[in-house]
Image (cartoon, rainbow, N blue to C red):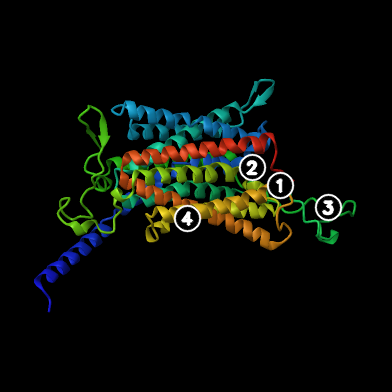
Amino acid sequence: MFSLSRLDTAAEEAWVYGSRKEAFLDISIITYVLVVIFGTASWIAINGLWVELPIIVQEIPESWSLPSYLTVIIQLANIAPLAFTLGNKFYPRMVHEIPVIYISLFIGTVSCVLLVFFWKETSFIAGAERSTALLVLCFFLSVVDCTSSVTFLPYMAIFREVYMSPYFLGEGLSGLIPSLVALGQGVGGGSHTPCPSESPTQAPVNTTNGTSNITDSSSWGPGPKFPAEGFFWFLAGMMLASGLAFLGLNYLSVAKRQQVKTIYEVSPDGGQRSTLELVSYEQGSSPGSNPLSNQGSIDPDKTTTKDSIFLMAILAVVSGLSNGVIPAIQSYACIPYSYYIYHLTLTLSNIANPVTCFVFPFIRTTSTLIIAVLSCVYFGMCTYILIVASQSPNVLLRCNDSGAVLIVFISVSAVSVVTYIKVAIGGIMREKGRRHLLWYGVSEQIGSCVGALAMFAPVNIYHYFKQE
C-alpha cells in the first residue's frame, strides 16, 4: 500500500528529473561553440611554432638550437602571469581577467601577422647573426599563451560548469589543429639510419657508382606545400577568431544567459571578489528550495583544504612532465624507430587530448584517490619514455615492430591520462570557486616552468640524450 509521503517523494523525484532534463536541453550550442573557439587561443600560437620548427630552422642562423631558445623564452614569459596574479591580488578593481584577455588576444593576433613579414629578419649581435625579430615575437606569443593559464580559467568560472569541458576541448584543439595543418603542409628532409640487421640488398642503391647507401632511408616526404608565411597567416586567423568568440561570450544575449548572476561584487573591506552563484538552471527555483536538486553535483565541502593542496601538487608535477620534460625528449624516444613513428606519435597525441576532454563528462570522477592512482600510472608511462630516450639512438626493441608500437601506444596513452587528470582537477577547482581556478593556473605554470628548466641542461649542455 502506497503512503501519501511516498507519492510526494515520487512526485518530487520526477520534478527533479524533469528539471535536470530541462537544464541539459537548455545548454546553448552557440555558447558551447564560442567557448571551444575561445579555448583554442590558449596555446595555439606556441603549439603552432613548435610544429613549424622543421621548416623554420632551415632558414635561420640558430638552426636546430632554436628549440632551446624557445624553452628559455617561454619560461621568461611566465613573468606575465606572475604580474597578473600579483596585480589581481593587490589591485583587483583595476586588474582582472576580461580586459587582460582582450589585450592578450590583440597582442597574439598582431604578433602572428608580424611573423609573416619579419620572421627571417636577423641582426648582428654578440659576434653572430641572430633572428631577433623571430625571437622577440616568440616572446610576445609566449606571454599571451602563458597568461592564458591564469586568466582564461578564472574567466570560465562565470559560466555554468557544463562549459568547462568545451573549454578544455578548445585547449586541446590548440595543439591538434596546428599539427594537422603542419601535417598537410609537409616538411621534407631528414634521414634515418636503418637497423644493423638489415642486409645491404635492402638498402637503396646509388646508381652512379653501384654501391649501397645504408644511411639514406625514410624521410618526412617532399618539401612543404606552402611556406611558413602561409602557416603564420593561419595562426593569425585562429587568434582573430578566438578574439571574436570572446566578444560573443561577453555581449551575445544567448551567452549571457549561461553566466552567473553577477561577475564581481564589492566586499566589506573595499576589495573586489567574484561570486559563483549560478543561474538557477539546475535547480529550477530559488536556491535551497529543493534539497534533491543538488544531487549528482560536486560538493565543494567534501574537498578539504588538504585535498586541494594535494591536487594542486599533483597538477604541478604532471604539468612539469607533460609540458616540460616529455616534449623535450620525445624526439629522442621516437626518431630511432623512424621519422614516421615520431610524426605518428605527435599527431595521435594531439588527437588524444581533445578526445579525452570530449568524453570526460561521461566518465568523470571527483575522487582524489582515483586521480592519485591515475597520476601514478602516468608517472610510470613517463618513466618508460625517459628510459627509452636515454638509450637513444640504440633504443629498446629498435629493430622490432613491437618497440615502435609500444612507444606510440605509451606516449599517446600518457597524453590521454594526463589530460583526464587535468580536466578532473579543473572540474573540482571550478566548484571551489574562482580563486581556486586561479591557483589551478598558477600550479600548472609553476610545474611547467620547473619541468622545462630541469631538462634544458641535460639536453642542450650535457647532451645526455643523443640523436643519430
Q: Residue furthest front?
A: 306
User: From what the image shows, is residue 208 above or below residue 64?
Assistant: below
User: SS at mark 3?
Assistant: loop
Closer-to-camera residue (390/78): 390
Mark 4 residue type: Val
Q: Which residue is mark 4?
A: 373
Mark 1 residue type: Gly
The residue depicted at 50 percent of the width and 55 percent of the height is 416
Q: Which residue is mark 3?
A: 213
The circle on residue 54 is: 2
Label 1: few (<14), some (14–19) or many (≥20) C-alpha neighbours in 10 Å: few
Q: Which residue is mark 1?
A: 190
Q: Position of residue 379 (x, y in %)?
A: 54, 51
Closer to the chain start, of discs 2 and 4, is: 2
- Marks 1 and 2 sit apart, C-alpha to C-alpha, by 9 Å
- Marks 2 and 4 sit apart, C-alpha to C-alpha, by 37 Å
